[in-house]
Image: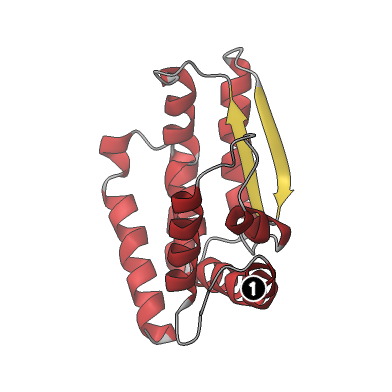
Amino acid sequence: MSPTSELGAFQLLVKGYIGKAKDSGYSAEQVALLKSALDTGAVDFEDYKTAVTTSLECINLAGIRTQVDMNDQSYGFPFISYSYESPASGNPTAEACIRENSEAVEALYQMQPSSVDAGNQMILDAVPEISECLKGAGIPFDPEGLSADEIATKLHEMGSEEGFLPDGSLGPVRTCMMNAGF
């Protein structure tokens, strides 16, 4: 896909979120951030951070504890990872805070072309280290001619097939991936 068509596809996604904003219960602030993304063709980190921070404040005000890493780089681009207290059935209060304040902005930030490109580059940069590690463990892996998505899928499949070792530790595929930052 060319950069122009990627941008067009992204703007269609933004328009879709704006179109369902009222039915989804998005706040006026989140809608304003969506309109900004439509105008600029991107969700910048500061807008993303504003939306996530508003969700986290809402969750905390409801008395729900959160854990936050404001500078997670594990996806190849700046990312805010967070979790909140929740029973297995989910936490409707926290989910409502996220839906109202950041759901669409978070999704678009992760799906925008620059984030996808950065994530793909992170995968491609990790391939030599992962390949060498797997080779040392006697595990065949040939990423030649594969896209970043195909490499990620293949590695995750290999990791799932091997499962965990009897002592509960990671097997060699997952260890190689983790050691390479993937």
**Image-based side of 10 in relation to 172, left or right:** left
Residue 53 occupies quadrant: top right
Vertically, is 155 above or below 81?
Answer: below
User: In the rendered image of this protein, does residue 8 appear above or below residue 42?
Assistant: below
Residue that numbered label 1 is attached to:
135
Nearer-the-camera pick, 49 or 137: 137
Confirm whether residue 12 shows in the render: yes
Q: Position of residue 29 (x, y in %)?
A: 50, 42
Q: Position of residue 119 (x, y in %)?
A: 57, 67
Q: Residue at x 49, y 74 (%)?
A: 148
Q: What residue sits 44% from the left and 19% below the top?
A: 88
Residue density around tag 1, few if under 14, some if 14–19, many if 20 or more, within 10 Å: few
Q: Point out the image quarter for the C terminus.
A: bottom right
Q: Where residue 37 appears, x then y in whole percent?
A: 47, 62
Residue at the image point whose x is 50% and y is 86% from the top: 144
Q: Amino acid at mark 1?
A: Lys
Q: Is residue 84 left or right of residue 29?
A: right
- Asked whether 165 or 31 is in front, the reply is 165
Residue furthest toward the top? 63
The relative height of residue 44 versus residue 91 in the rendered view (above or below) is below
Image side of residue 169 versus residue 99, left or right: right
The quarter in which the N terminus is drawn is bottom left
**Closer to the camera, 66 or 151?**
151
Pinpoint residue 78: horizontal percent, then vertical percent: 67, 58
Q: Residue at x 44, y 84 (%)?
A: 3
